[in-house]
Amino acid sequence: MSRQADPIHVLMVEDDEEDIELTKESLKSSKVTLNLQVVEDGEQALFYLRKTPPYTEATRPDLILLDLNLPKKNGREVLAEMRQDDSLRSIPVIILTTSDQEEDVLKTYQLGANCYITKPVGLDQFTKVVSSIDNFWFSIVKLPSRT
């Protein structure tokens, strides 16, 4: 089976149930097969990525959708730890957050984010943003292999 026939594994790190459901709904129409896993805080994200219990069977994600404002460990802390870990450094990270503060944008790019998207208000705009992520990251971009 070729890499392109494999599903794309996405880890969403988000604590807002409405945003999780909107993202899931928006990705249903994806042209590629997606496997979306969700964790609701930064600590769980790192457990998942490091395959620490209860995530010992977790599949390495091809892409991460990371909120900044999370319980336990915020998105900046998660991103910093990922970029310091040789085994996690190459996973593309999309910041998807409500913050439009310039300092958040700058800091996350300095930490190694691959892109920064401010969540729009409203269902239609949110759906358009997620569809744009789908079209670009899952159809155009070549993602690194899961080794």
Image (cartoon, rainbow, N blue to C red):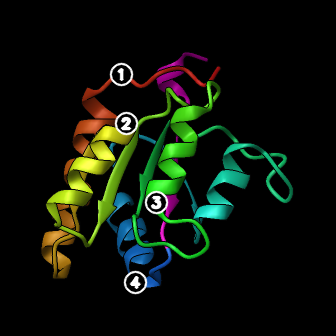
The range drawn in magenta is: 1-14
Asked if marks 1 and 3 touch (Cβ < 8 Å), the reply is no
Q: Which residue is mark 1?
A: 142
Decide which of 130, 88 is in the foreground and name it: 88
Mark sitting earlier along the chain (3/4)? 4
Identify which amino acid the numbered label 2 is placed on: Gly
**Which residue position holds label 4?**
18
Report the Cα–Cα distance between label 3 and label 2: 12 Å
Q: Residue at x 57, y 66 (%)?
A: 73
- In space, the residues marked 4 and 1 are separated at their CA atoms by 30 Å
Quarter of the C terminus within the rendering: top right
Q: Secondary structure at mark 3?
A: helix
Whole-Å distance between the Cαs marked 2 and 1? 18 Å
Mark 1 or mark 3: name the one nearer the start of the chain. 3
Indicate left or right for 129 with 84 as reference. left
Q: Residue at x 26, y 43 (%)?
A: 115
Do tag 4 and tag 2 residues touch (Cβ < 8 Å)?
no
Are the residues at dot 3 and dot 4 in contact (C-beta closer than 8 Å)? Answer: no
Q: How far across and how far down the image is residue 89, in percent?
A: 53, 29
Q: Amino acid at mark 1?
A: Lys
Q: Is 5 one of the magenta-colored residues?
A: yes
Q: Which residue is mark 3?
A: 75
State which tag comes first along the sequence, 4 or 2. Answer: 4
Residue 125, picture quadrant:
bottom left
Label 3 Cα neighbours within 10 Å, binned few <14 / some 14-19 / many ≥20: many
Q: Is residue 48 magenta?
A: no
Q: Identify residue type, mark 4.
A: Glu
Judged from this view, the residue extending furthest toward the top is 2
Which residue carries the number 2 mark?
112
Observer-nearest residue: 90 or 120? 90
